[in-house]
Image (cartoon, helix red, strand yellow):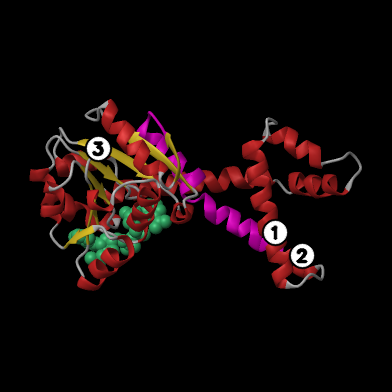
Amino acid sequence: MSNICFIGAGNMAQSIIGGLLKSGSRKESIWATARSEDKRTNLADNFGVNTTDNNVAAVEACRIIILAVKPQMMFGVCEEIAPYIQGKLVISVAAGISCESLEKWLGKNAAIVRCMPNTPSLIGQGACGLYANANTNTLQKQAAQAILEATGKAVWVDDEALMHTVTAVSGSGPAYFFLFLEAMTQAAVEQGLDQHTAQSLAIQTAKGAALLAEQSDDNLETLRKKVTSPGGTTEQAILSFEHSGLRGTINKAMAACAERSKVMAEELS
Ligand SMILES: NC(=O)c1ccc[n+]([C@@H]2O[C@H](COP(=O)([O-])OP(=O)(O)OC[C@H]3O[C@@H](n4cnc5c(N)ncnc54)[C@H](OP(=O)(O)O)[C@@H]3O)[C@@H](O)[C@H]2O)c1
């Protein structure tokens, strides 16, 4: 794969760098920029990649540029590197910045892939949505997919508006499951289990259920029904969830999340 540079090497960039190195990329082919010397020293010590405080020099050394600064910093970085990205692929991991904004800042011919990763990518278990603008060719799309797959699953959407839904499912999704786990743990503690036992049983159950759902030939409904014997214990819990309108609650929460994503995208443009 071509040389890759990361503009901004914080949490998200480091999770991708870690994944790339684990999946066989050469450290010499990776550049990371950071403004503080301490950060550059840490990056060099932890990953052995090339580091610099000069964004333009890093861009000039690479064919793939990953923009991993906070959304508010994106305009300044794009303005700085815009004259040097011709014929290169720019991948943005910034939440809420549209391709239209990136094209406005980088140039209308820029090849851009936008991603929405999530925090489990920090441990190689991410779920990431990808969208490519019309200037991006097949090889560039394949390169973007390979890079993001180093942090977990990477899935394309062909309508950029669906990135708001990706945000509502996988971008923000980890927080929903943490909330569910908190509530399950609290309920188990109220029923008498100690905190540690309650939490580890809840977490292992979520992990087991997710892995079973991924590996089984059964669909989600069948898997649920297999745990829910008529007249049994699970049925009581499921009936209680359904009577309290859990599905409607989730629907409303995800709609609110997608709406906030749209508003933020407008503010950032
Ligand atoms: N973390 C997540 O779970 C997550 C999930 C989805 C999407 N994202 C997206 O990923 C992007 C990065 O998030 P993050 O959590 O990794 O943030 P972060 O840890 O704060 O990393 C951003 C890095 O950018 C550096 N930086 C700022 N301005 C710069 C400049 N002009 N040139 C070079 N480097 C610069 C900062 O270092 P200095 O200030 O020291 O220079 C910092 O290390 C964001 O756009 C966010 O929306 C993150």
How far is mark 3 from mark 1, CA to CA?
40 Å
Identify the mark at residue 202; answer none if there is no mark: 1
Secondary structure category for the residue under label 3: strand
Q: Residues within 10 Å of mark 2 (few under 14, many from 20)?
A: some
Q: Is residue 5 visible?
A: no
- State whether residue 223 is above or below residue 189: above
Location of mark 2 (residue): 188
Residue 224 shown in magenta: no
| Label 2 near ligand 1 (CB < 8 Å) | no
Q: Residue at x 70, y 53 (%)?
A: 205
Q: Residue at x 75, y 39 (%)?
A: 224
Identify the mark at residue 163; answer none if there is no mark: none
Three-letter amino acid code of the residue under disc 1:
Ala
Estimate the x, y position of residue 265 in percent, counting from the top left.
33, 46
Estimate the x, y position of residue 235 in percent, counting from the top left.
84, 44
Q: Residue at x 75, y 64 (%)?
A: 187
Estimate the x, y position of residue 10 in percent, counting from the top left.
32, 61
Q: Is residue 106 left or right of residue 194?
A: left
Secondary structure category for the residue under label 2: helix
Identify the mark at residue 112; answer none if there is no mark: 3
Q: Is residue 161 visible?
A: yes
Q: Which residues are magenta?
A: 156-185
Q: Name the quadrant containing residue 210.
A: top right
- State whether residue 9 is above or below residue 265: below
Q: Is residue 59 left or right of residue 241?
A: left
Q: Name the quadrant containing residue 109.
A: top left
Estimate the x, y position of residue 158 in percent, counting from the top left.
38, 28
Q: In the displayed image of the protein, which residue is found farthest to the left? A: 83
The answer to the question of whether label 2 and label 1 lie on touching residues, with beta carbons closer than 8 A, is yes
Which of marks 2 and 3 precedes in the sequence?
Answer: 3
